[in-house]
Image (cartoon, rainbow, N blue to C red):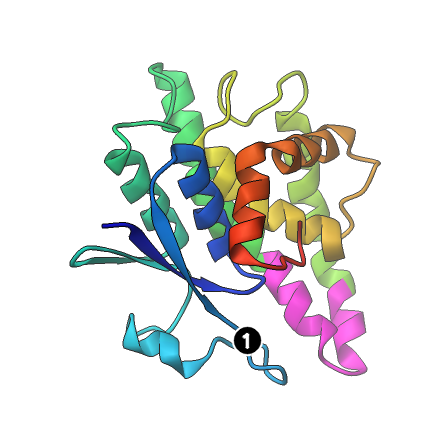
Amino acid sequence: MPIIVHHLENSRSQRILWMLEELALPYEVKRYERNAKTMLAPPELKQVHPLGKSPVIQDGDTVVAETGAIIEYLVEKADGKLGPPPHREAILRYRFYLHYAEGSLMPPLLVKLVLSRVPVFGKAAQKRIQPMIDNHLSFVERELAGREWFVGDDLTAADIMMSFPLEAARQRAGLDASRPNTIAWLDRIHARPAYQRALERGGPYAYA
C-alpha cells in the first residue's frame, strides 16, 4: 500500500513529498488548504492526528507526525538511503542538522512571520529578531563553504530538513546573493528532478 501524505499547502510537508520522490517510495497525497483569513490548517487534520498539524503520514496502520520523525521513519523504511555516511563525524553532523533545522533555525523565522502581521509594533519588533536570523544565516553560509551538501559529498535527509527554513529565509528574512554558498545550495536542490516532481504532486509552493 502506498504511504498517504496529509499535505498542507505552503508548509513543511513539501519536504516529505520531496523525500519520498528521492527514495522512490510509492505515495498518495491528500491535500489541505489553509484558512484564507487565519492561514491555519483546517480542522479536518485533527481527524488524522490530535494536533491537527501537517505533515502527517499514514503507512498502513502506522501514523507518524512531525517532520523530523517522519524523515527518520522514511530513512529506516528505505534501508538507510539518504541517511548519514558511515563515519562518526558525518553522523554527528547529520544528526545536528536534522535537529537544528526546526530546533534553532526555524523559530526566529516563525517569530518574524508572526510579527509581520502585527500592525505598528510588529515592524519595530522585527528589527530585534533580524540579527538572530542573520547570525544563523552567516553560520549556514560558513558551513556550506567548500562543499555542496550539508553532510558529506551527497544529498542526505539533512539537506531535505534544511530546505524549508532556508527557502523561507530567502522569501522573507534577508537571505540573498550576499550569501552565495547558501543560494547555490538552494539552486542545486531546486534543480533536482525529484524536487521538481514533488512540486508537481504537491501543488503551488510559495517558498520554492
Residue that lies at the very extreme toward the right in this rendered image: 178
> Which residue is pictured at 39% across the width and 26% down the height?
92
> Which residue is pictured at 57% across the width and 33% down the height?
193
- Find disc 1 in the rendering and name its residue: 34
Residue nearer the viewer, 135 or 157: 157
Magenta-span inclusion, residue 148:
no
Tell me which corner region of the image, top left, top right, bottom left or bottom right, holds residue 60: bottom left
Region in magenta: 108-126
> Which residue is pictured at 71% across the width and 77% down the height?
117
The tally of labels here is 1
Callout 1, which amino acid?
Arg
Q: Position of residue 143 (x, y in %)?
A: 61, 27
Residue 83 vertical placement versus 34 (above, below): above
Magenta-span inclusion, residue 116:
yes
Answer with left or right where residue 119 lies relative to residue 189: right
Q: Position of residue 156 (x, y in %)?
A: 45, 29
> Which residue is pictured at 29% across the width and 77% down the height?
47
Residue 161 vertical placement versus 132 (above, below): above
